[in-house]
Image (cartoon, coloured by chain):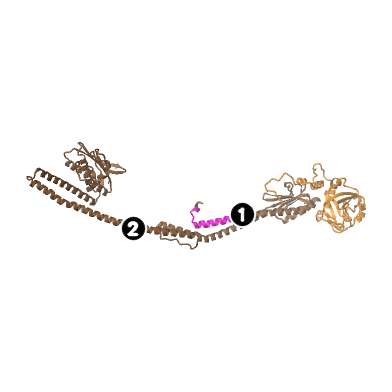
Amino acid sequence: MLGVRNYSITKKLIGMNMLVSGAALLIACAAFVAYDLITFREAMVHNLSIQAQMAGSNSVSPLMFNDPQAAENTLSALKAAPNVVLAGIYTLDGRPFATYWRGGNGQTVALPQMYTNQTEGHWFKDGQLLLVRTIVFQRKPTGTVYIRSDLREMSARLKRYAGIAAMVLLASLVAALLVASIFQRAVAEPIVHLAEITRIVSRDKNYAMRATPTGKRDEPDILIGAFNEMLRQIQQREEALQQAHDELEQRVEERTAQLAAANKELEAFSYSVSHDLRTPLRGIDGFSLALLEDYAERLDDQGKEHLQRIRAATQRMGMLIDDLLNLSRMTRAEIRKESFDISTIAHSVVESLQEAHAKRRIEFWIEDGLEANADPRLLRVVLENLLGNACKFTSKRTSARVEFGKMHRNGSTAYFVRDNGAGFDPAYADRLFGAFQRLHGATEFPGTGVGLATVQRIIHRHGGQIWAEGEVEKGAAFYFTL
Amino acid sequence: MTGKHIRGMEPFQCTPARCVTSSGPSRLFRFVAVVVACAVIAAPILYGQQSNPTEYEVKAAYLYNFGKFVEWPAKARTADDSFTICVLGQDPFGTTFDTTIAGENINGKKVVIKRVAKPQDALSCRILFISSSEESRLKEIVATLDKTSVLTVSDIPQFTRRGGMIQFVVEANKVRFEVNLAIAERAGLILSSQLLKVAISVRRSPQAGD
């Protein structure tokens, strides 16, 4: 039965039809044959009983007048019945009186035992029908007749029946095959067609396909109608979805363009503002210096100090503008990635830092041979900022220590810059990277608050991540991936 | 269908003879059965207490059996309620009749045995056995019984040629009989073909060769 499951519905229908008709016919044939055989058997017993009665009543006088020859003559009439194998007349006490054999062999046969109180008894034994009948003459038992008949006729009949049944079965199976192949067209074809369309639809995602209705008001037609309706709805929804999707995409594109334009404008604006701010600032600084140098004798100490303050402020503002320009440049600069030795860059940054902080004693530790795939120009800016910060925030330590290296965290490689400086409150860790965000006072640690924003911008543009860990007065660590 | 035997079942422990006799046949039937059985078996075999039947025992049984194969005319001068078997002359049967056949019945009629001395006394008999002691008077006896419906039986030689109907003949130790059908028919008797079938010879002419 396993193979049958994979057959097409057409084959299943035809097979089912043939099985059903075959089974029905077989059962019917079996019933008919059984009925006929039973009837035939009864008829056979009946006929044999009649033959026994005739032989018996014709043997009454030979029995009574002790004439076995006459009885044998009587029995020899059974030659007309070819099914009779043996017939015998027996006296009342069971002695053989006359015997007839189909072949002529006249040997006597012992009388089989019989039930009590019955005139006649018969049974089937060894493919023969045995019948014993008491000969009754004038209501008195006179002797016994015994007839044995073979079942040749019955087996011949059975053979004939089997032949007829086989022929009928064959003919009906052929007829069933024909009828089933005609009817399967009405039942299976629409379903096969529907299955094919379903297959194509699910393969090609083509919801414009439609199954052809049968045109009859039967279940396959309802199925096809419902399927087509489903396809229509799916098609509708898909179109609506596609439309909505297209609209959305268009809107996103528009917004992106607007956003990019606005951003560009803003950047251009901030650049030009920063750039344009420098000129008047240089003027303020220059004229303040001129005042200090050229009119020093006419100014009192108070005026000189004011001027000094003006100069310090303008210089700070200049630094701020530089940083802003830097940030702006980093944002716009094109990234050119390449593989390089990041440790070498760290060393060169540390060298310049050591020159700048020649008076301080800072212990640097840099892991050698670290490779990176990034824009080396921008990575130098990152390291300048992070290592510079580390130097700046360890300024109050007598023995400062700054480290740069590589570590594994959460399955990815992260570079780190660690110091033992002032640290920060971990609650504000996210705010570290915002522009102009400062967690320490400018008087305590000078700076513009743009450096870490620049670093974050560069790392993000590389597709990496940056985060910081630290505690107040216990140092800080910055990690970044590329 | 009378058959109630189911194939494969062991039949009841009972021979047909025993089964049949158990249904209550008469002493005579038992006697006849034994007589016939012994006649068939060449070697004399003893059945229980009974010895091999004598010639006249067999003949007595035959006389009784004739009654069953012969039809008497309705106007027969015989008593309606009894079936009389007569013996004329010296009785060779001894007590056989009285012990076995008397009291039986044929076609519902009680069998009565009568011994007669004169043929005139035998007119009311159905069957008359003429003893060989009467051979000398045979012509007279036949004449007396002519056209009466008495079935005449005898073992007198040439009996059927001399006006008798049935004559016993002993052949190879077996009792057989000859029939003169013409005489029986003239007396209005109808002899069954069954009876004629077992006769040695059946004469159809009244007194051929006499």
Drawn side of residue A219 relative to residue B78, left or right: left
Q: Between A293 and A162, which is closer to the camera in this rendering?
A: A293
Residue range corresponding to the magenta coloring: A4-29
Q: Badge 2, how many Cα within 10 Å: few under 14, some, many 20+? A: few
Residue type, numbered disc 2? Asp
Query: Dot 1 corresponds to which residue?
Result: A30
Instruction: Give the residue furthest to the bottom.
Output: A215
Query: Main structural element of the magenta stretch: helix, strand or loop?
Result: helix
Numbered mark located on residue A264 in the image: none
Q: Earlier in the sequence, mark 2 or mark 1?
A: 1
Drawn side of residue A116 relative to residue B74, left or right: left
The subunit letter for the residue under badge 2 reads A
Q: Between A156 and A278, which is closer to the camera in this rendering?
A: A278
Dot 2: element: helix
* Marks 2 & 1 on one chain: yes
Instruction: Give the residue furthest to the top.
Output: A398
Q: Badge 1, how many Cα within 10 Å: few under 14, some, many 20+? A: some
Q: Is residue A155 visible?
A: no
Dot 1: element: helix
| Residue A165 rendering spot, x and y as whole percentages | 61, 57
Verify whether residue A10 appears in magenta.
yes
Numbered mark located on residue A246 in the image: 2
The subunit letter for the residue under badge 1 reads A
Colour in which the image shows chain A: brown
| Residue A26 rendering spot, x and y as whole percentages | 59, 55
Colour in which the image shows chain B: orange
